[in-house]
Image: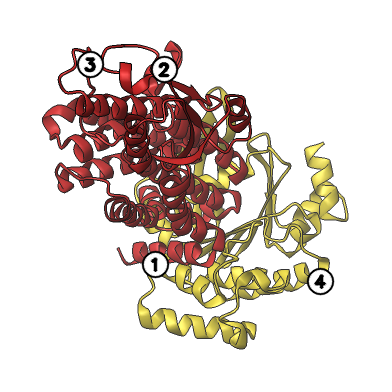
Chain colours: A red, B yellow
Amino acid sequence: MKQFIYFIKKEFIHIFRDTKSLIILFALPIIQIILFGFALTNEIKNVNFAVYDNSKSDTSLRLINKIDATDYFTLHKYLNNPDDIEAILQSNKVKFVLVIDEDFSRLYPHEKQGDIQLLLDASDPNIATNIRGYLQNIITTFSEEEFPLSEQLHLATTKMYYNPELKSVYLFIPGLMAFILTLISAFMTSITLTKEKELGNMEILLISPLKPYQIIIGKVIPYALLSMINIANILLLGTFVFGMPLQGSLLLLLLESILFLLNSLSLGILISSFTSSRQVAMMVALAGLLLPTMLLSGFMFPINNMPLPLQYFSKIVPATHYIIILKGIMIKGVGLQYLYKETLILALLTIFFIIISIKKFNVRLDK
Amino acid sequence: MITVNNLTKKFGKFTAVDEISFEVPKGEIFGFLGANGAGKTTAIKMLCGLSKPTSGSANIAGYDLLSQVEQVKLNIGYMSQKFSLYDDLTISENIDFYGGLYRLKGNELKQKKEKIVQELGLNNQRNALVGFLPLGWKQKLAFSVATIHDPKILFLDEPTSGVDPITRRKFWEIIIATANQGITIFVTTHYLDEAEYCDRISIMVNGKIIALDSPANLKQQLNVSTTAEIFAQLTR
């Protein structure tokens, strides 16, 4: 047992003496949260718009004020000439232009079409779709308030369950947790294990009285601990700074995270068992783990929009299931009875990876 | 100290080590020679308990290789051409780590550490990173660390490859001094002149030991004047 403690101590010295690994372990997760939280977002916030108001009525003014008063949109300019519309869209100063009909206020209650025209800069289609959705809601509410007795058919209003404000933080916190656990537990573990092999120290360790499983557990424990610290960091930052909810059980969340952690560690060990240089391990972990976790797990892109083969592939990306579990617990507040399927898949994947890595490791020992 | 009986290792149909048998008495420097691919590394791996023999048996330092691997491991030391030290750990930390691996107690470890840094004259550099040491010092330190638990047998796998002739010579002086303290040395090398330092040498070809005697006797038998010629004659 004592020799085991010396082993773990040595591993921590390696970590704390290497600036690069320190940055990956501590700075990167926080930088990513801040980047995703503040910068890389599809959310609509203070989007500039212009108005070409032909009616110049009280009603149109009230509508413009109402739109301007939201956090989403800011009135940039009134246009006086229809020729300016395209110019201002091209100049990128505004994302959309509202054109209000001359007879807007008079005819509004009776007419059903053509009262307001929305000209959108759709060079970023996601943002354009979002803007249209938000505007639609505002205008529907407005017409309900202004003309309560009108016979106008209202659009069926949409109610957003679980994420009424469509905040992207709800998506990126679970995604980031999966990504960071994969990065630290799988990526860093595979590199640190391969490093021992590459430098020839693995032989010495195997010849020592340490048992092979002790070597692996000893190498892996520091990264497991640091991963847990990072999970705590992300959760704290996510809930307190970005307002991520935690509706369900924290205990369940932590247990599921430990399951995913074990999964990542076993993948890291697996990669190290068939690579013998750090470069190769890094490339394999990058292409085989980090990219799928980013791109194919539903973190960045919705799985339903992927071509069918990729949808099947996403099922064997462990992060896919972990993200579903996290969203279930944090946003919907559901318990294990709704998440047993994902948990089971994650557990089976973990056992599968552990068995392969043990087999691989033994075969390698025998050569 | 080492008794090997018909030790064999097969990988599928390929026989890497083919029924080798030999004995090495206490305090002997035993040179284990052979061309690349002759089965040296596989044989050493089996003797160190890293790889399971397909058949045959061996007794290492008084323990059975098959049933008492843990005792065997506690009583042997190992050093290879790749230095076993961690460059990003200090001299002191490296000693602590290997001492800890071999279950040295706190006080014992302290005394050992003092002894090593004093003997190597590294007292003032004990908190320096090993990565900054010159190659020769690193090698000496690696040797001291490999013997930190007073093993009965020391396995040296090409310990001097890539080292300049003067350092090699000095290194052999340390090896000989260690053998004189009663530690059995089992060494592989591909510098044939180094075979002269060995009490006995064995030459391995295609998984079999085809010659085993003192360098002088072998030279006489084959009527040659250097160990290099022995090797050339036997492996032709």
Residue sitting at x 80%, y 46%: B231
- The amino acid on which the numbered mark 1 sits, given as a three-letter code, is Tyr
In which chain is the residue bearing label 2? A
Could you tell me which chain the residue with mark 3 belongs to? A
Question: In the rendered image, which quarter contains the N terminus of chain A?
Answer: bottom left
Q: Which residue in the structure is indicated by mark 1?
A: A6
Specify whether disc 1 shares its chain with disc 4: no
Say which label, 2 or 1, has the lower sequence index.
Answer: 1
CA–CA distance in space, label 2 to label 1: 50 Å
Circle 2: element type = helix
Q: Nearer the viewer, mark 1 or mark 3?
A: 3
Separation of disc 3 and disc 2 at Cα? 30 Å
Q: Position of residue B149 (x, y in %)?
A: 46, 71
Q: CA distance from mark 1 to mark 4?
A: 35 Å
Q: Position of residue A290 (x, y in %)?
A: 48, 37
State the SS at label 1: helix
Query: In the image, is residue A322 above or below residue B73?
Result: above
Question: Do pointers 4 and 2 mark residues of a single chain?
Answer: no
Mark-to-mark CA distance, 1 and 3 = 72 Å
Q: Are marks 2 and 1 on the same chain?
A: yes
Going 21% across and 25% down the picture, which residue do you hit? A144
Chain under callout 4: B
Which badge, 1 or 3, comes first in the chain's sequence?
A: 1
| Residue bearing mark 2 | A305
Q: Amino acid at mark 3?
A: His
Question: Which one is in front, B136 or A18?
Answer: A18
Q: Which mark is residue A154?
A: 3
Amino acid type at mark 4? Ile
Task: Judge whether B172 appears above or below A326 on screen.
Answer: below
Q: Write down the residue under mark 4.
A: B166
